[in-house]
Every structure is written in C-alpha cells, then in structure tokens.
Image (cartoon, rainbow, N blue to C red):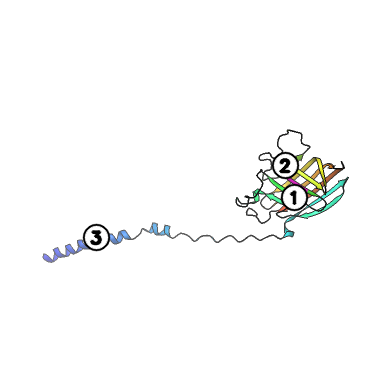
Amino acid sequence: MMKVAVAAVLLLAACPKHDEDYKKQKPPEEEAKEAAPPPPPPKPAKKALTEDEMGECKLTASGGLKAEQTTKGGQGATNISYWRSEQERAGMMGLDGFAINCFGSDIRFSMTPGGKKDGMPFAPKKYDFKPVAKNAEPRDAAVNITFGKQTLDAVTGTVNVTAFDKHHIAGTIDVSGKTVPGKQAVTVKGTFDLICPNFAGCE
C-alpha cells in the first residue's frame, strides 16, 4: 500500500513539469507564421539611355524665314514632373504641367504651362493657340519661338500631343505668326518624339 501511494505522489509531482514543457512549445500555426517567405529579389537597374536614344525634334520654318533643324531629346528637351519622383521635382517650376524644348542654332521652340490649373494633363491632348487678349483667363499652355534675335508674335495654330506616357511624349507642331522685329509672316511645322530621360518614373 505504501508503494502505491509513493508512486501516485511521484506521478503527480511529474505532471506540472509536463504542463510547463507543453506551454513552452509553440503551436504549429505560430511556427508557420514565423517562417515568412524570403523577400523578392531587387528590381534590375534601369538601362541608362544614350543621347542618340533620347528621341528628337524636327522643325521647319517657311515664309518670311526659312530653316530646317533636328535637335535631340534629353533632360534639356523635357521638363516633365510626371516622370520624376518627389525628390526629383524639388527644383522644378511651380506651375502645373510640363515643358518641351526644341533648341537649335536656327530655331528655338518651347511649349510651357499657360497658368491654368490641370491645363496640361498626363495624357494626349491637342493644344490650340491664338493671340492673347489683355486680362484674358490663364491658358492651358504657351508657346515661345525665336529665330536669333527675332521672336514669333501673335502665334496661332496647334501643338497636338498624340502620345504621352512613362516612356515618351510625342506629337506634331503647326503654328504661325509674325516676327518681331520685321513683321515677317512665318509658319513653323514639325514633329517631336522625346524619350523619358532616366528619371525615377521612366519605363
């Protein structure tokens, strides 16, 4: 009888240790959660485009002045917030929109924001131009064209942005005006296809 009692006491004494060991062991569900999958591999570095891969702008002037030129794309040819990260936008102009520049030795063409909020969206769009009256409302965009020391004034016509995404901006130019000084009637036509120049938002 004494042996049975001692055995019972020993069995009871052993049970708490068994409970403690069980409590220390994590359930299978928790162990599965801790075994998280490895992180995905880093994205491959973007290929830096060369000058010849940045696209180009072709312009022809006719009428009172005649000229033909082709200029290359690159960061000097585009100033587009949609292609940049917040950090890259730090030094940009404060107006909404974007700028396109086709600067050559004979013709300097640029299209810039006209001051109208959301006037230059990140999408294809046809921009119409006409002489601006005094106290006029802000425009979607503005164009500035010079030939050396002469400026094209009272510009009318269109710039048709036919493609605009994270890869490029492309379209056609067809505008006319009169030179100042000189008052020569001149028409400028052309095409542009400018590639996103290695910014964070480029694809």
Image height of 130 relative to 83, above or below: above
Residue type beneath disc 2: Ala
Q: Nearer the viewer, residue 141 or 38?
A: 141
| Closer to viewer: mark 3 or mark 2 | 2
Q: Secondary structure at mark 2?
A: strand
Q: Residue at x 84, y 48 (%)?
A: 61
Left or right: 177 in relation to 139: right
Q: Nearer the viewer, residue 14 or 99?
A: 99
Residue 118 at what x, y percent from top left?
A: 66, 40
Left or right: 103 in relation to 201: right
Q: Which disc, if any, is residue 101?
A: 1
Mark 3 / mark 2, whichever is N-terminal: 3
Mark 3 / mark 1, whichever is N-terminal: 3
Q: Residue at x 32, y 60 (%)?
A: 24
Residue 18 at what x, y percent from top left?
A: 26, 62
Cα–Cα gap, marks 3 and 1: 82 Å
Left or right: 3 in relation to 74: left
Residue type beneath disc 3: Pro
Crowdedness near tag 3: few (<14), some (14–19) or many (≥20) residues, C-alpha within 10 Å:
few
Magenta span: 109-113
Q: Which residue is mark 2?
A: 141
Q: Which disc, if any, is residue 16?
A: 3
Crowdedness near tag 1: few (<14), some (14–19) or many (≥20) residues, C-alpha within 10 Å:
many
Quarter of the image where one finds residue 153 = top right
Left or right: 194 in relation to 42: right
Mark 3 vs 2: CB contact within 8 A = no
Q: Which disc, if any, is residue 126?
A: none
Crowdedness near tag 2: few (<14), some (14–19) or many (≥20) residues, C-alpha within 10 Å:
many
Mark 2 vs 1: CB contact within 8 A = no
Q: Nearer the viewer, residue 64 or 46?
A: 64
